[in-house]
Image: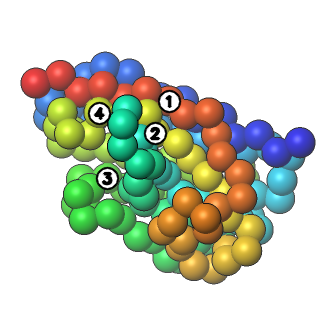
Amino acid sequence: QVQLVESGGGLVQAGGSLRLSCAASGLTFSWYAMGWFRQVPGKEREFVSGISWNGGTTYYADSVKGRFTISRDNDKNTVYLQMNSLNPEDTAVYYCAADHSRPETVGRTLQDYDYWGQGTQVAISS
């Protein structure tokens, strides 16, 4: 079965950095666009960043543009999210997701994605 496993979350001070990883199994990774979303309690899950099957197209939410970088390694079946200049508003559970229907583009809604990981907690202290 398909599994997406996030890692790399934790507690850091404002201004710090984290690198999230999402390891995929049970699917042909290069056939999927990948995305990162985040959610805080009481709020809807929101799009953070996405990357097409070959990395040729990326997209970022305005709130993270210039601070976060998404990348992928198809040989390792892994997508990454490098997060710099973190601030308390970035505190959330971060989820990765896989989109089979539109691998050449970047979906930005929950409905665009077929599979989801369990999430990793990111907490930023002020």
- Secondary structure, mark 4, is loop
Q: Quadrant of residue 105?
A: bottom right
User: Is any part of residue 66 visible from this angle?
Assistant: yes
Q: Which mark is residue 68?
A: 3
As measured in the structure, the alpha-carbon distance from the residue carrying label 2 to the one carrying label 4 is: 9 Å
- Secondary structure, mark 2, is strand
- Placement of 12 over or under 21, stated as above or below: above
Question: Where does the image place residue 70, in percent across and percent down from the top left?
Answer: 44, 56
What amino acid is found at the position of numbered circle 4 in the picture? Answer: Thr
Question: Where does the image place residue 51, in percent across and percent down from the top left?
Answer: 53, 66
As measured in the structure, the alpha-carbon distance from the residue carrying label 4 to the one carrying label 3 is: 14 Å
- Foreground label between 2 and 3: 2
Which of the two labelled residues, at mark 2 and mark 3, occupies the earlier sequence position? Answer: 3
What amino acid is found at the position of numbered circle 1 in the picture? Answer: Thr
As measured in the structure, the alpha-carbon distance from the residue carrying label 1 to the one carrying label 3 is: 16 Å
**Residue drawn at (43%, 27%), measured in percent from left and top?**
121
From this viewpoint, which residue is outermost toward the left?
A: 126
Residue labelled with disc 2 = 94
Task: Name the image quarter holding the C terminus.
Answer: top left
**Residue drawn at (35%, 65%), measured in percent from left and top?**
60
**Residue drawn at (51%, 66%), measured in percent from left and top?**
109
Nearer to me, 23 or 96 = 96
- Secondary structure, mark 1, is strand
Q: Is residue 109 left or right of residue 27?
A: left
- Placement of 111 over or under 41, stated as above or below: below
Question: Where does the image place residue 58, in percent across and percent down from the top left?
Answer: 45, 71
